[in-house]
Amino acid sequence: MSKDTSAADRVGSALDRLESMVEDRLRAESARSDDLARRLERLERQHDDLRKVALEVEGRLERAMEYIRSLLAADQK
């Protein structure tokens, strides 16, 4: 085997390993991306749920404060 053939074989082997590494990395990053997308979707749903609860609590507090004000006003008469 000549030096040129041996060098070409080594380069070819190195390129094969590099391609394999890149493909492995792409698969891993794709899985990670999918996981992050699922987590983001779940967090967005939780955020929407919490926003609804906060609005409901705000409304209840406003009604309670108005009721207390009316009681205080009636007490001062």
Image: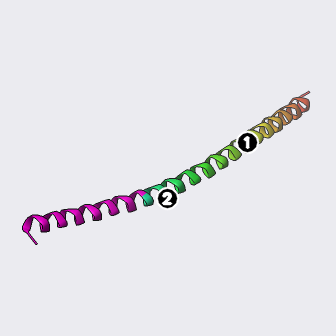
Which residue is label 2 attached to?
Answer: 31
Residue 24 occupies which quadrant of the picture? bottom left
Q: Callout 1, which amino acid?
A: Lys
Q: Is residue 76 shown left or right of residue 51?
A: right
Which residue is label 1 attached to?
Answer: 52
Q: Give percent across and percent down for residue 42.
A: 63, 52
Please tell me which residue is depicted at 53% across the width and 54% down the height of the picture.
34
In the rendered view, would you say 57 is above or below 25?
above
Please tell me which residue is depicted at 73% across the width and 42% down the height of the picture.
52
Q: Which mark is drawn over residue 16?
A: none
Residue closest to the far front: 1
Instruction: Assign the magenta stretch its main secondary structure.
Output: helix
Label 2 to label 1: alpha-carbon separation: 32 Å
Q: Is residue 2 shown left or right of residue 51?
A: left
The residue closer to the viewer here, 32 or 42, is: 32
Q: Give percent across and percent down for residue 60.
A: 80, 40
Secondary structure at numbered mark 1: helix
Q: Give percent across and percent down for residue 4.
A: 9, 64
Please tell me which residue is depicted at 68% across the width and 43% down the height of the picture.
48
The residue closer to the viewer here, 23 or 2, is: 2
Q: Which of marks 2 and 1 is in front?
A: 2
Task: Quarter of the image for the N terminus: give it.
Answer: bottom left
Mark toward the start of the polypeptide (2 vs 1):
2
Extent of the magenta region:
1-26
The answer to if 37 sits in the magenta stretch is no
Residue closest to the far top: 77
Secondary structure at numbered mark 2: helix
Task: Quarter of the image for the C terminus: give it.
Answer: top right
Residue 13 occupies which quadrant of the picture? bottom left
